Image (cartoon, rainbow, N blue to C red):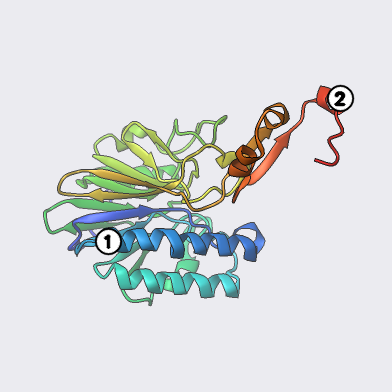
Amino acid sequence: MIEDKSHKTPAKRVWIISDSHFGARNNSVEWLDRMIGYFNEYFIPIVKKEYRPGDILIHCGDVYDNRQSVNLLVLHQTMQLFEELGKIFVDGIHVIAGNHDIMRKNTNDITSLDTIKYIPNVNIYKEPVTLSTENGTELLLMPWRKSESDEQTCIAGSAASYLFCHTTIQGAKFDKYRHAGEGVSSEHCKDFKRVYTGHIHTTQEYKNILYVGNPYQMTRSDAQNTKGFWCLDFESGKETFYENKYSPKFVKIYINKALDSTLDELIKVATNNFVDIYIPNDYLMKYQVTPL
């Protein structure tokens, strides 16, 4: 059972994101522009349009990518983004520490999230906390724990309806080919109405558990995995998904299909995407593929 650390929140709905990983790809400026662009050009306009008083935002961990340092440009852009989000979510932004946000594996004391904790309306959590809404709904926020036993202790006996965390749950998929054989058992999570967790980037549902995933595709293993963010209404229990229709995707094109496609069809597939062209060995013998 977690220590009694409860906070009141006027929340009526919660917007849910996770694993933004600012500073990924060795602090690539190109990737940072894509990530921040997604929030500025897509996420924020949707939130502003759909916003209602009482809306809060929960980030399920891994705001940053690098565990040891934060690039100055990454820091500048991230702080600007949370300042803008703080103006929208006046009833609170709640960010739990992910494993990429903490410096040491066995403690959450030193974390890059301290860079945003003084921004108005932004709250960061290094240790578990329970949020209680005005209608009595309780939310358990569980940041990265150093062991499965610590996670089980945190979850055990909680009366919360919803769990927001950053963890591995046994049986979930790391990607299309691998399942998690480690992590906390889904049995320990069965009493929650819904579990929203970060950490694994593949967006997926497993029993009562929703892996939020990253909001945009970051590697080829994300191909064909639909990305986006959620909004949960506590009163109705309705969960709304907003698909990311802004960011580039990783796309495979097989040469035989490409040769049978029109130029317009190929342009449609390739525009704003990362494209891999797969060429069987027998095609290498038949055609001049170097110009392609």
**Which element carries disc 2, helix, strand or loop?**
helix
Q: Nearer the viewer, mark 2 or mark 1?
A: 2
- x 49%, y 53%: residue: 246
Q: Is mark 1 on a helix, strand or loop?
A: strand
Left or right, 214 with reference to 207: right
Q: Above or below — where is 244 with respect to 109? A: above
Residue underneath mark 1: 56
Q: Which of 65 and 35 is in front in this view?
A: 35
Residue ID at (43%, 42%)? 148
Residue 14 placement, left or right of 134: right
**Considering only order in the chain, which callout, 1 or 2, is on the residue closer to the N terminus?**
1
Relative placement, left or right, of 198 versus 276 is: left
Q: Which amino acid does label 1 sit on?
A: Ile
Q: Is disc 2 in contact with disc 1, using a CB cutoff of under 8 Å? A: no
Please give the residue where the numbered disc 2 appears in the rendered image.
Answer: 286
The x, y position of residue 234, in whole percent, is: 19, 49
Q: Position of residue 291 (x, y in %)?
A: 84, 42
**How many other residues sit within 10 Å of disc 1, few (<14), some (14-19) or many (≥20)?**
many
Q: Give the amino acid at mark 2.
A: Lys
